[in-house]
Image (cartoon, rainbow, N blue to C red):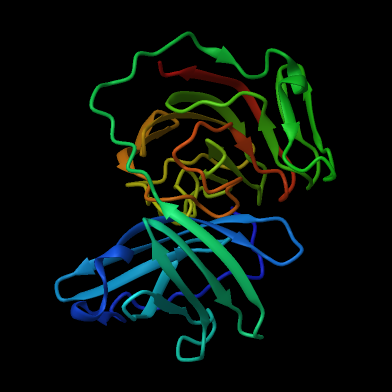
Amino acid sequence: MAPVVPLVIALVTLAACTPAPELPPEVIGRWDVTMQPTGEAPYASWFEVVQEGDSFSGRWQPGGGHATPINQITTTADSFAFVRPPENDLTAPGYVMAGTIVSGQMAGAMTDLDGTVTSFTASRTPPLVRTVAPVWGEPIDLLAKGIDGWHLQDPASTQGWRVMDGVLENTEAGGNLVTNGKWMDFKLELEVNVPAGGNSGIYLRGRHEVQVLDSYGKPAGSREMGGIYGQVTPTGNPAKPAGEWQTFEITFVGRRVTVVLNGIHMIHDMEIPGVTGGAMDANSGEPGPIMLQGDHGAMQFRNVRLTPGQ
């Protein structure tokens, strides 16, 4: 599960929208967003505005949590704004996002419920359409060098990771673990052992989380085992009971992902619209690492192999 930050936003109905004539076409589409809090490190976000008949709606992905709808989309000749109501009261005042677009680049600010202002910049989310299938290279054993093939996302965080007898395990809540290598298109195979109540995530290119959760017996969901967190819902949930080894086969080409869990296709060639909560950065058109979420506690992985596309 993606880590929750204070900017988690609320669900509102997608029916809340703005008449089409008032909205300039420049803001329509998907945007990779970098938020810059004053005196703090930047973090990745994302949003989209879509046209539905004669009206518009959209979603926003905060720094943590999952993408949720936006409303009250308004604009002037050279600017735009929308509102994100708080999760526990859909009728209350919300966060206000406002900005301008110049030559395809966006800049603006978010005003928090307490008046705090956070600046942001954004670029259009690249489509990453592939016209030919990738040529696959040789598989890479990501545990061949043990823990030396990885590093902590935050060097100051707790190092709870170790490799023993070919098993990569997180022994306590601590830092996220990141591969030293980066890739664009790839196939990733691994086994995971989820303890009772276990919670982690596999971040593709460090930006798109495949949920790892003790989800045995639960309905399929984008925030359950194997879902793309808050973005893509699987067709089923073939998760095994806690404590059993489970197999993932993940293929990620452009923006399209296929997830096979325990031999069952649960996501087949589906588009991931944008980054998920906890993404390392908003540069979704660039190669990135594999990141394993470590801030929720114990988890085990083994036989972690990546086959790069060429």
Q: Is residue 118 left or right of residue 188?
A: right
Q: Is residue 176 visible?
A: yes
Task: Tell me: residue 93, above or below residue 198.
Answer: below
Q: In the rendered image, is residue 244 in sight?
A: no
Say which of 6 and 74 sits in front.
74
Where residue 120 sits, quadrant-wise, is bottom right
User: What residue is rendered at 37% in x and 51% in y?
Assistant: 233
Q: Position of residue 194 (x, y in %)?
A: 63, 40
The reply, left or right, for residue 239 in relation to residue 112 is: left
Residue 244: percent from left, percent from top: 60, 34
User: From what the image shows, is residue 69 above or below residue 144?
Assistant: below
Q: Where residue 17 appears, x then y in whole percent?
A: 29, 80
Q: Is residue 181 left or right of residue 160?
A: left
Name the foreground residue: 161 vs 186: 186
Given the current orientation, which residue lies at the most extreme top position? 138
In the picture shown, does residue 207 fall above or below 183? Answer: below
Q: Quadrant of residue 304?
A: top right
Location of residue 165 in the rendering, given as x and y in whole percent from the top left corner: 76, 16
284, 22: nearer the viewer: 22
Which corner quadrant holds the C terminus? top left
Mark count: 0
Q: Residue at point 30% right, 64% down? A: 26
Instruction: Say whether residue 99 is left or right of residue 4.
Output: left
- Residue furthest toward the left? 53
Residue in front for this viewpoint, 72 or 214: 72
